[in-house]
Structure formats: structure tokens, C-alpha cells
Image: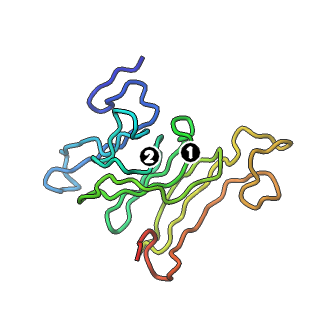
Amino acid sequence: MEQAHRANPRPNNFAGHIIEITESNNDHAGTSFTWEIFILAGDPEHSGTWYGGNEEVSPLAAPDNLTFDTEGNIWISTDGMSNNLPRNDGLFVAPTGGEERGLTRQFFSTVPDAECSGPIFNPDNTALFVSVQHPGEGGTLEEPLSLWPDGEVAPRPSVVLITHENPGTPVGRLD
């Protein structure tokens, strides 16, 4: 059995977590830093999860890839969430500061049995690219579990482009 310790506070931590690193004196070229748990993923109904002190969150598990937008929000893609929570993998966003720090919200969901990966923004955040990998994992050509992305042939990985309905508006902005 895996032992718990400060950097991994749960034994057999299948839900995963995200550690925040803060460079000393905000010197990104420096050689020293402090760190703390930013998100201890999993079902918030169970003790031992942590979403920056927030309880009304879209729970996530198995964080895999991270990116940040120009507002400083963290975007988290998941891989294997269904092994921990009864949900599809997806893309989640959370503020990294202020009163809503850690308030995680699901922004995008993959199809069942697929991984969400590689989120990346263009420079002005008006376009977000996300990969949907191995959709319908566990199926066969004869009995597919998904027909992503076109509904007609065997499932295939794809890149999804997400934009705001108002051209020129950053993705994720509510106004």
C-alpha cells in the first residue's frame, strides 16, 4: 500500500491532485520555491478532497494536462475520471486567486470512454483547442462503443476547436 506523505496526502491516490508551486520573490528563474496542494481531487462529499476551500464545485478526478488563460485561471483536462467518479473525462476551469480560488467548473465533456487532453489557447484566448483521445476505448470495430466524431465510421481521436459565440471574446468569459 502506498504511504501518504505531505506531497501525496492520500494513500493510493487514484483521484489525483494538483500541486501549486510559487517561486521565491516571484523570480521564475530562481532556484527556490514553496508549494501547497491546490486541488485534492475526488468527490467533495467524501472527506479528504480539497478545492481551495470551495464546496460547490464540479468534481474532477485524474487531472492530466494543465494550461492557463490570460486571466490566470487554470484549465485542467482529465484522463480516467470514470474510474473515480461516474462522469466522462472533461475540461475544467478554476480561478487561481481571489474568493473563488479553486472553484472548479466543468467546461467541456468528452464522449464516453475517451480522454480529454492537450488544452491550449491561442495568444488572445479567443480559441481553445482540446483533443479527444481514444473515444470508445474498450470497443471493437465490430462492436464500437462510440462513433465519434462523425457518427458514421469507427471512432477516431480528434481535435476540437472551441470559440465564444461572440467573435473576439475570450473563451470562458461569461459576458
Q: Position of residue 113 (x, y in %)?
A: 65, 44
* Pointer 1 residue: 87
In-image side of 50 versus 119 (left or right): left
Q: Which picture quadrant has residue 87?
A: top right
* Residue type at numbered disc 2: Pro
Q: Residue at x 26, y 47 (%)?
A: 21
Q: Residue at x 47, y 45 (%)?
A: 64
Secondary structure of the residue carrying tag 1 is loop
Q: Residues within 10 Å of mark 1 (few under 14, many from 20)?
A: some
Alpha carbons under labels 2 and 1: distance apart: 9 Å
Near-viewer residue (27 or 12)? 12
Describe the colour scheme in one phrase.
rainbow
Q: Residue at x 18, y 56 (%)?
A: 27
Q: Are marks 2 and 1 in contact (CB under 8 Å)?
A: yes
Residue 7 against residue 105 in the figure, above or below: above
Q: Which picture quadrant has residue 19?
A: top left
Q: Which disc is residue 163 wearing? A: none
Near-viewer residue (25 or 104)? 104
In-image side of 148 versus 42 (left or right): right
Q: Position of residue 47 (x, y in %)?
A: 35, 32
* Pointer 2 residue: 59
Q: Residue at x 28, y 55 (%)?
A: 101
Q: Earlier in the sequence, mark 2 or mark 1?
A: 2
* Residue type at numbered disc 1: Arg
Residue 37 against residue 1 in the figure, above or below: below
Secondary structure of the residue carrying tag 2 is loop
Point out the image quarter for the C terminus. Answer: bottom left
